[in-house]
């Protein structure tokens, strides 16, 4: 039971951290030149991701992780 719980937890972490890596490093650095042709709030999208977007995405991913872990805790009867 514990093994299943932790495997799912690690899977969630891998997926969410991959999304964060792609949004921060990928969109903010690697693909910034291509994204800078698109503007968001008057700023190039690549610049926006590097300065603010990755932070917003990180905070959203924290809430998603909390939701997923609460759901996983209920499935494994590990609620507080």
Image (cartoon, helix red, strand yellow):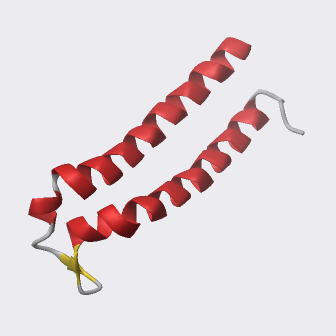
The residue at 25%/48% (across/down) is: 26
Q: Quarter holding the C terminus? A: top right
> Left or right: 37 with respect to 53?
left
* Front-most of residues 72 and 44: 44
Query: Where is residue 72 shown, x and y percent of the image?
Result: 69, 35
> Left or right: 1 with respect to 62?
right
Residue reaching furthest bottom? 42
Q: Can residue 1 be seen in this view?
A: no
Q: Can residue 5 be seen in this view?
A: yes
> Left or right: 47 with respect to 2?
left
Residue reaching furthest right? 80
Q: Please say if 80 is above or below 11.
A: below
* Front-most of residues 45 and 16: 45
Query: Where is residue 6 shown, x and y percent of the image?
Result: 64, 21
The residue at 74%/32% (across/down) is: 75
Q: Within the image, what quadrant is residue 27 found in?
A: bottom left
The residue at 54%/59% (across/down) is: 59
Q: Within the image, what quadrant is residue 68 found in?
A: top right
Q: Please say if 46 is above or below 67.
A: below
Q: Quarter holding the N terminus? A: top right
The residue at 40%/68% (across/down) is: 52
Query: Where is residue 10 shown, x and y percent of the image?
Result: 55, 26
Q: How many labels does the image show?
A: 0
Q: Please say if 28 is above or below 53.
A: above
> Left or right: 52 with respect to 27?
right
């Amino acid at each position: 039971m514990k093994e299943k719980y932790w495997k799912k937890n690690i899977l969630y972490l891998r997926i969410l951290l991959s999304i964060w890596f792609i949004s921060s490093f990928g969109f903010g650095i690697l693909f910034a030149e291509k994204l800078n042709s698109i503007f968001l709030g008057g700023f190039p999208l690549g610049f926006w991701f590097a300065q603010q977007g990755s932070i917003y995405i990180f905070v959203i991913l924290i809430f998603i992780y909390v939701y997923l872990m609460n759901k996983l805790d209920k499935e494994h009867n590990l609620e507080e």
